[in-house]
Image (spheres, grey):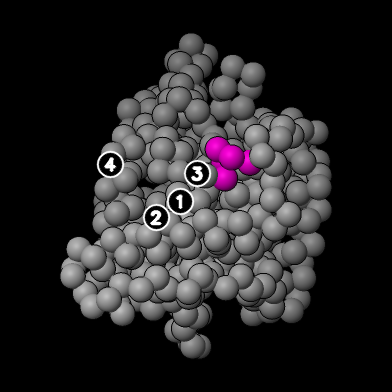
Amino acid sequence: MTTEDRHQDLLRELAPQVLGALVHRYGRFDACEDAVQEALLAAATQWPQAGVPDNPRAWLVTVASRRLTDELRREHARRRREDAAAAQPAPAPVSDRDDTLALLVLCCHPALSPASQIALTLRAVGGLSTAQIARAFLVPEATMAQRISRAKQSIKAAGATFAIPPEPELAERLRVVLHVLYLIFNEGYSATAGPHLQRPDLVREAIRLTRAVLALRHDDGEVAGLLALMLLTDARRAARTRPDGALVPLAEQDRSLWRQDEIDEGTALVTDALAQAPVGPYQVQAAIAAIHAEARRAQDTDWQQILALYQLLEGMARNPVVTLNHAVALAMVQGPHAGLDLLATLDGDPRLGGSHRLDAVRAHLLEMAGDRDAAVEAYRAAARRTTSLPEKRHLEGRAARLVSA
C-alpha cells in the first residue's frame, strides 16, 4: 500500500468522527459537512508534504471548526445580526466519543430517497468526494452535487436532530442504515451499469462502514449477519471475472481463488450470530453464502439446505430478488420446471421494473430443462435489458453457444 493510499484510508476512517464532533457541538449538519470536506481536502493536500500530524483527528476538527466559524461569521454579517450573535463560537472540543452511528442514522433519514441516502452516506460517513461518488454511479459530478445538496436541505427541512433515537425507533432506523450499506455493497459487487462488473472501492467502503456499526452494536445479530454476508460474498471476487473482464458464473468459478480469510471470518460471524441472537434476513442470507463457501466443488453444494433457508427467508423478507434465488435453489433440488413455475409468479411484478434478472434466471432454468429455443430468446431479452456491459456480453455469449450447439 502506498503512502497516498494510507492517507486516504486514514481520512475515510476519521471523516465520520470529525463530522460527528462538529455536528454534536454546532448542529447545522449541512454547514458542518461542507467544513469537513474542506478539511479533508486540506489534509489530502498538506499531509503528503508536511507529514501526518501527531493527532490527525484533532487537526481535522480544528481546521473544519475554523472553516465553519468563518462561514458562520459571514452568515451572521449578511443577516446583520447583533454583535453578540456574530461572535465566533468556541472551538469544538476534541473528545473520544464516536458519533458514527448517529451520523449514519442522520444520513439515512426517512425524508430522503434511497439514492440520496446512499450518496449522503458515502459523502458524509465514507469520506468520498462528490466526484468519486459520481464516478461510482456513472452520473455527472454536477448531478451528484445537486443530489447531495438536496439531501442536506431535506434533512434541514425535516428538522432532523443529531442524536441516537430511543428504542424502538432506533431499531427501525438501524434497519434503514443496514439496507443502505447493503445497497452500497451490491452496487460495488455487481455494478448496475458501465464497463466493469465490480467496483471494489464501494465493496471495501460498505464492509468498512458495517464493521464500524458492528463495533458500536456488537450484540446486534443482523449487523453481524450483514457483515458476514458481505465478507462471504466478497471472498469470491477474484474468481468472478476472467483476465479480460468477462463474467464467470458461480458454478464455473475457480474456488481456489476464493479468499479463505474472509470465508473464515464471515462463517464465524454468522455462526455466532445465529447462536446468540434472534434470526433475521441478513443472517439467513449469510448462512446461504456460507454453505456455498463450504463446497469445494459446485456439485458438492448442499442445495437441499439452501432451499430450506430460502423458504425461511421468503417468510421473513418476501421480495422478487429472494424469489428469483429461491427458484434457482428449487430447480437444483426438484428440477427446472419447479423453478420455472415459481418464476412465473413474478411475471408482471412491478417491483422488477425493467430489470433483466427475471429473464436471465428464466433463461438459465430453460437451458437446464433442455428448451433451447426458449432459453436463447430469454437470454437475448435479458441482454437487451441489462446496462452492465460484462453481463450483456455474458448473456449474449450464452445465447450464441446454444444457437451453435
Question: At 64% from the left edge and 80% from the top edge, which residue is drawn?
Answer: 278
Left or right? Give the position of 41 relative to 153: right
Q: Are marks 1 and 2 in contact (CB under 8 Å)?
A: yes
Residue 145: give its label.
none
Q: CA distance from mark 2 to mark 3?
A: 11 Å
Q: CA distance from mark 4 to mark 3?
A: 21 Å
The residue mark sitting in front, 2 or 4, is 2
Q: Amino acid at mark 2?
A: Asp
Residue identifier under label 4 = 143
Choose the circle earlier in sequence order: 4 or 1. Answer: 1
The residue mark sitting in front, 4 or 1, is 1
Residue 387 location (% of width, % of height): 37, 32
Magenta residues, as a range?
43-47
Q: CA distance from mark 1 to mark 2?
A: 5 Å
Residue identifier under label 3 = 41
Residue identifier under label 1 = 37
Q: Amino acid at mark 3?
A: Leu
Can residue 160 be seen?
yes
Q: CA distance from mark 2 to mark 4?
A: 17 Å
Q: Are marks 2 and 4 in contact (CB under 8 Å)?
A: no
Residue identifier under label 2 = 34
